[in-house]
């Protein structure tokens, strides 16, 4: 533990992973837990190895929720889940560098499974390992697993027992809309009992193309989709990162068949 603020008590200290000085990494402050998360980006290796703007928005909101749930846009959603009185189980889809999942585990004291395509897993493992001290100090646990969208077998392996599903910047290529929606249907609608507590998907998204409205149009057929938060636009953008909350429509569960496909035409 290193004290960068010059404070004289442990409570004032900023928690820095011991590996931090060895990493070519970006640093992300979690003010509410006096900690810094270190993330290795490998930008030359493609879009899965860099941090996207929506991830930073979710990190900021998670940090703000831990600081003061009553003023956080995530307040109503996370407080309702917290009422379940156990470490929350969270799944992150398309984690990329893993920043959001690591921040969620650390700020919520949650058990988080970060997932992505198989070739992304080594960097995810690296980043989780780099932040073990911050996670341990805050009661967070992060597991890493491969999960390809649209792959029912991957969901079978990982299971569906998650309270919350998170993702940032996962709606971009239109050929991925349907596989992502299939995974969401399996996770959120699949085999839920009538009296089971609802699962929630919280997604941060930066709109880039008009075609993305097709994803939301399809999603609204089976999910209630609400806006929780909108960031002010960054320089050069017309829109800011928007955070959505997806929950099952009552009729959505009935429309799901055993393969995760709905019987509705989109
Ligand atoms: C734009 S990046 C966002 C990464 C990270 N969530 C962030 O905000 O920094 C999209 C992520 O989705 C993942 N992805 C793309 N297609 C996928 C698929 N078919 N199954 C699972 N993950 C996928 C990519 O590997 C990548 O990590």
Image (spheres, grey):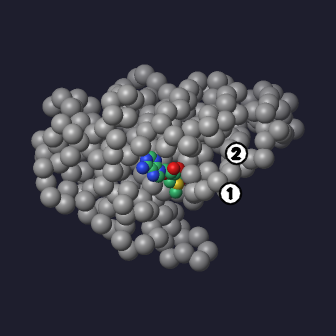
The residue labelled by disc 2 is 40
Image position, residue 162 (x, y; %): 37, 31
Q: Residue at x 38, y 56 (%)?
A: 176
Q: Is residue 12 visible?
A: no
Specify the quadrant that holds the C terminus.
bottom left
Secondary-structure class at tag 2: strand
Of tags 1 and 2, which is closer to the observer?
Answer: 1
CA gap, disc 1 and disc 2: 12 Å
Looking at this view, name the residue that lies furthest to the front: 119
Specify the quadrant that holds the N terminus.
top right
Q: Where is 4 relative to 61, above or below?
A: above
The residue labelled by disc 1 is 44
Image position, residue 241 (x, y; %): 49, 62
Q: In terms of image quadrants, where is residue 46? A: bottom right
Q: Residue at x 70, y 37 (%)?
A: 35
Q: Where is 240 relative to 54, above or below?
A: below
Q: Is residue 155 visible?
A: yes
Q: Residues within 10 Å of mark 2 (few under 14, many from 20)?
A: many
Q: Residue at x 50, y 76 (%)?
A: 238
Image position, residue 131 (x, y; %): 68, 33
């Amino acid at each position: 533990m290193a004290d960068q603020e010059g404070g004289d008590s442990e409570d004032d200290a900023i928690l820095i992973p011991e590996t931090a000085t060895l990493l070519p990494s970006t640093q992300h402050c979690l003010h509410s837990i006096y900690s810094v998360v270190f993330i290795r980006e490998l930008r030359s290796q493609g879009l899965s190895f860099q941090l996207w703007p929506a991830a930073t928005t979710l990190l900021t909101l998670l940090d703000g929720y831990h600081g003061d749930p009553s003023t956080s846009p995530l307040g109503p959603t996370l407080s309702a889940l917290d009422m379940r009185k156990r470490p929350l189980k969270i799944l992150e889809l398309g984690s990329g560098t893993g920043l959001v999942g690591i921040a969620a585990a650390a700020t919520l004291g949650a058990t988080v499974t970060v997932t992505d395509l198989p070739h992304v897993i080594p960097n995810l493992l690296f980043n989780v390992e780099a932040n073990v001290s911050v996670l341990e100090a805050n009661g967070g646990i992060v597991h890493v697993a491969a999960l390809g969208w649209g792959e029912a077998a991957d969901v079978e392996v990982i299971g569906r027992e998650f309270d919350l599903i998170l993702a940032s910047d996962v709606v971009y290529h239109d050929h991925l809309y349907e596989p992502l929606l299939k995974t969401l249907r399996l996770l959120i609608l699949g085999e839920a009992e009538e009296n089971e507590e609802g699962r929630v998907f919280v997604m941060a998204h930066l709109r880039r193309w008009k075609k993305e409205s097709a994803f939301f149009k399809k999603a609204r057929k089976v999910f209630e989709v609400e806006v929780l938060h909108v960031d002010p636009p960054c320089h050069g953008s017309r829109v800011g990162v928007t955070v959505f909350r997806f929950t099952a429509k009552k009729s959505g569960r009935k429309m799901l068949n055993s393969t995760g496909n709905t019987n509705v035409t989109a």
